[in-house]
Image: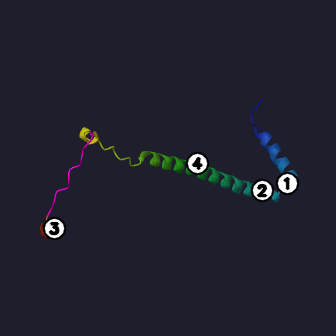
Amino acid sequence: MGALKPWHIAVLVVVLILLFGAKRLPDAARSLGRSLRIIKAETKSLTDDDKDLAEKADAQHSRQPYTPEPVIQPSSVHQPGYQPPAPPVTDPVQRVRDN
């Protein structure tokens, strides 16, 4: 009972010819083919766009923002009366000679 037999197809073709005429059927089939081609191309581009977005999202997740490591201060810094060591004194003449 749900099988499509050859005589079903023949009846369908005869009905279509009677409704639309023999002259309009090729144009209708051509426009239907174009429409299906356009739909296929659009759905393919949508799936490609989804894949591109997924790849971009994966690439962004692999990057980590720079977070500087906390500087660990020696315990003597927190004691009262602590003074940081003075920078070494260099002779300006010697510094020019070194460069």
Q: Label the magenta part by its dominant secondary structure.
A: loop
Q: Earlier in the sequence, mark 4 or mark 1?
A: 1
Q: Earlier in the sequence, mark 4 or mark 2?
A: 2
Q: Amino acid at mark 2?
A: Ala
Image coords of residue 1 (percent x, y): 77, 29
Graded by Cα atoms within 10 Å as few (under 14), some (14 to 19) or many (20 or more), the crowding at tag 3 reads: few
- Residue beneath the point at 42% across and 46% down: 62
Image coords of residue 34 (percent x, y): 70, 57
Helix, strand or loop at disc 4?
helix
| Left/right of residue 59 with respect to residue 80 in the rendered view | right
- Residue beneath the point at 85% across and 56% down: 21
- In space, the residues marked 3 and 4 are separated at their CA atoms by 68 Å
- In space, the residues marked 4 and 1 are separated at their CA atoms by 37 Å
Helix, strand or loop at disc 2?
helix
Query: In this picture, which residue range is highlighted in magenta?
Result: 79-90
Task: Residue 20: give its label.
Answer: 1
Task: Residue 47: give its label.
Answer: 4
Name the residue carrying label 2: 28
- In space, the residues marked 3 and 2 are separated at their CA atoms by 93 Å
